[in-house]
Structure formats: C-alpha cells, structure tokens
Amino acid sequence: MNNIVFEHVVKAYGKNVIVNNLNMEIREGERLILLGPSGCGKSTTLRMIAGLEDITSGSLHMRGQVVNNVACGDRGVSMVFQNYALFPHMTVKNNIIYGLKAHKMEAAEINHRLEEVLEMLQLKGLEDRKPKDLSGGQRQRVALARAVVKRSDYFLLDEPLSNLDAQLRLRARKELVKIHEMYRPTMVYVTHDQIEAMTVGQRVAIMYRGNMEMLDTPSHVYNMPASIFCARFIGSPSMNIISCQYENGNLSIGDQMIRLEPMWRPIADACPSGKYCVGIRPEHAVLSSRPTETSICGTVKYVEDYGNRYGVYIDVKGEKSELIAICNDSVPRPGENIFINIDFRKLHLFDAQSEKSLGYPEEIRRLNAALDFFMPDAQNKNQKTGGKYHESFGQYQCV
Ligand SMILES: Nc1ncnc2c1ncn2[C@@H]1O[C@H](COP(=O)(O)OP(=O)(O)OP(=O)(O)O)[C@@H](O)[C@H]1O
C-alpha cells in the first residue's frame, strides 16, 4: 500500500525545532496539500518524505516499512522543485528521459513513455531545445514531464507553479489534476497559496510554526476550521474574530446580548462560562437595516469597492474590534447604523486561550459531510462529476 505515515516525527536543526511531533497518514493515491505560511515547515516535511532530510526523531513509514534510513533513490519518489532544477546543458528530451536511462530501462519503453508525456504536456516540437530557450511555463511542464515519466508510486511537488503567471497557473493546476487522475500516485503538494491548495487538494494539511493545525477536505477546512489560525488563513477577506462572553445560553458581544440557538447548546454548555471568540466570515455577515432576534448592531466606518462586491467595515457597538461584511448590493453608507444578522449555521466558536475550535453541532457536521460526498477522493473517483474536471474552493464547488 503506497501510503505515508508520520509517527511522532520531529525535525530540528540544533535546538531549533522545525517540525514538531508530526502525526499524519497520507493515503494511497490521494492528492494531499501541505499548506501554511512561509517558514512553517512544509518543504522540510516534503523533503523528509523524499529522503532529502534526516529525521531527528520519530518514524516515517512508506508502504508499511520504516524508511528513516532508506536513501532517496530507493523510496520510489519523483519530485518537482520550485525552481524546476532542469539540467541546463541537456535538451528537453534528455532532461525528461535522464532518470529512465539511469535505471537502464529498455529503449523501446523509454520512447513510448517519452512520446506519451510529450503529448500529454504539450511539449511536442520542443524536444531538442535547451531549457534556456523555453518560456517559464514550458520549463515547468518539462519539470513535470520528467517527474511523471518515471511513474513513481509517490509524486512530490514543492511549489511547482509559483513562478508562473496567474493564467498559466490556472491551466497548470488543471493539468496536474488530470495527470494525477491518470496514474493515481500518492501526491504530496506544498504551497502557501490557499486557492491552489483548495482546488488541487482532496485533503489539505494546514501547518503553522512546525505544528499540524488541521488535516481535512477543503470544504471542512473552510466550513469547520479547527483553530483561529486555520479560520483566518483560509478565505479572503479573513474571518472576523470577535471576543465574547458565554453564560447560560447567552452570548455577549460588546454590550449586546444574543441567545445562542439550541443546536449550539451542547457545544457551549460543555464549556465553562467565560471568555470565548466568535468567528463570522465576511461573506456570512448579512447586513440589514432591521434587527432580528439574532443580530448585533454597529456603525459603518468605510466601504471598499472590489469591483464585483463591496467590503463594509463596521464598528460593533461596545466592542473594540471592527467587523467586515461582504455586500453584493444595497451597500450602506459610512456613518449609517446597521444590523449584522448572525446565521447560526455559519457561526464558529473558539476557546479564547488555546484558540482551538469548540467543535460544531451535529447538524452542521451533517451538512458538511454531504458536501464531502460531492468531492472526488482517493477511494471515490470523481463519482459525482463523471470524471470531468472538478474544483473545490472550500466554500463552493466548480464543475
Ligand atoms: N538547513 C537548515 N538549517 C537551519 N534551519 C533551516 C534549514 N533548512 C530550513 N531551515 C528553517 O526551517 C524553517 C522551515 O523551513 P521550510 O523550508 O520547511 O519552510 P516552508 O514552510 O516550506 O517555507 P516557504 O514557504 O517559505 O518555503 C525555516 O525557518 C527555515 O529557515
């Protein structure tokens, strides 16, 4: 089974701990994304899988075997680097088949695979060029071709699209998904770009300061973030986090009080009364000129025009931090008093100290499980999309 299991894996340089007690399983044939801010330890984690970094403690398993001391060349991995790492003196063709020749593969098989990959990645006609005579997008495709042609069990990619412009990135991520669907290697992909993570990944592992914060599907990461860090890292503009007080079914925000909906009571009542944080995504903060039983009021500070929608910044009454709401029409004016209606199906509650989620009501979990059925996964090949390209942006699905 071509899975990867991290068991209490630590990576440190001297006293500097880069990856801290990592435990996770990457399933056979899935596309798993390592996502997180710069310096959080993503590349180090990928390089440990590739065998390019020693493991300080813990064990790494591949195909059910501990591979801590197995050399890179014996792990059956192909890797694509951010800078492509092509041999500058070799032609495109020789760059691609270099690894196959090194493994003394028969010439007929080499040619067959070369033709297939040139066709697949639209590199026909460029075989005899050197890397310096290629565009950035073409170089990136050669780097992919060189990895794909090996048909390894494991396909590791470290920010492979970061040198491409926005248009090329969009095309390239579709190509990547198609390539993966063809051979179904176990794919681990490092990026700090949340859109790339959500659209390419079947599951996303969010890392922060060497720790694994969350590992789940894009829709779960977006709809049920495990911590304030995950909540704010995914989504743009970032989720509003407002401090609140909880007692006896009542949530106080600033000097306003709302009644927590019954579905949330088992979650909130399991925690002691006291300080918590409420999370509301800007796109879920519905503005109205009339109050409801579950709205809080504030004053519009200023409005940002995004072209297709507006960001409305609001001072919440009695609360220091401001809140941002997304509006498509009926944009309020600065100075206007406004009500923010809280939709309890879109609410998030976090512990103020640990900043971890308090969890989600059963009803919300069920709603999100239904979304997951829509997602293709390693076991359930594109079942709802008939094999056509399918992207998840976390909050919505694009087919
Ligand atoms: N050889 C090394 N010696 C000491 N520290 C290192 C070494 N290699 C990496 N680090 C440190 O480990 C931390 C994690 O690096 P890593 O490359 O894994 O981060 P990353 O999440 O991939 O970031 P980025 O997105 O910027 O590439 C960084 O603080 C980096 O400076």
Image (tube, rainbow, N blue to C red):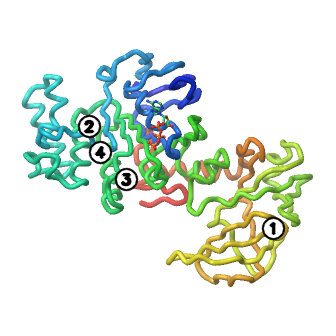
Q: Which residue is mark 1?
A: 294
Q: Which residue is mark 4?
A: 179
* Disc 3 element: loop
At 17% from the left and 23% from the top, the residue drawn is 103
Q: Is disc 4 in contact with disc 1, using a CB cutoff of under 8 Å?
A: no
At 50% from the left and 41% from the top, the residue drawn is 39
Please name which of the two marks, 3 or 4, marks the residue nearer to the observer.
Answer: 4
Cα separation, mark 3 vs mark 4, equals: 16 Å
* Disc 4 element: helix
Sequence-wise, which precedes: disc 3 or disc 2? 2
Q: Amino acid at mark 1?
A: Thr
Please name which of the two marks, 3 or 2, marks the residue nearer to the observer.
Answer: 2
* Disc 1 element: loop
Tally of numbered discs: 4
Cα separation, mark 2 vs mark 4, equals: 11 Å
Q: Which residue is mark 3?
A: 386
User: Which of these two is toward me, 349 or 383?
Assistant: 349
Q: Which residue is mark 2?
A: 147
Please name which of the two marks, 2 or 4, marks the residue nearer to the observer.
Answer: 2
Please name which of the two marks, 1 or 2, marks the residue nearer to the observer.
Answer: 2
Q: Is residue 220 above or below residue 286?
A: above
User: Which of these two is toward me, 19 or 154?
Assistant: 19
* Disc 2 element: helix
Q: Is residue 259 above or below residue 134?
A: below
Residue 375 in picture, x, y percent from top left: 48, 49
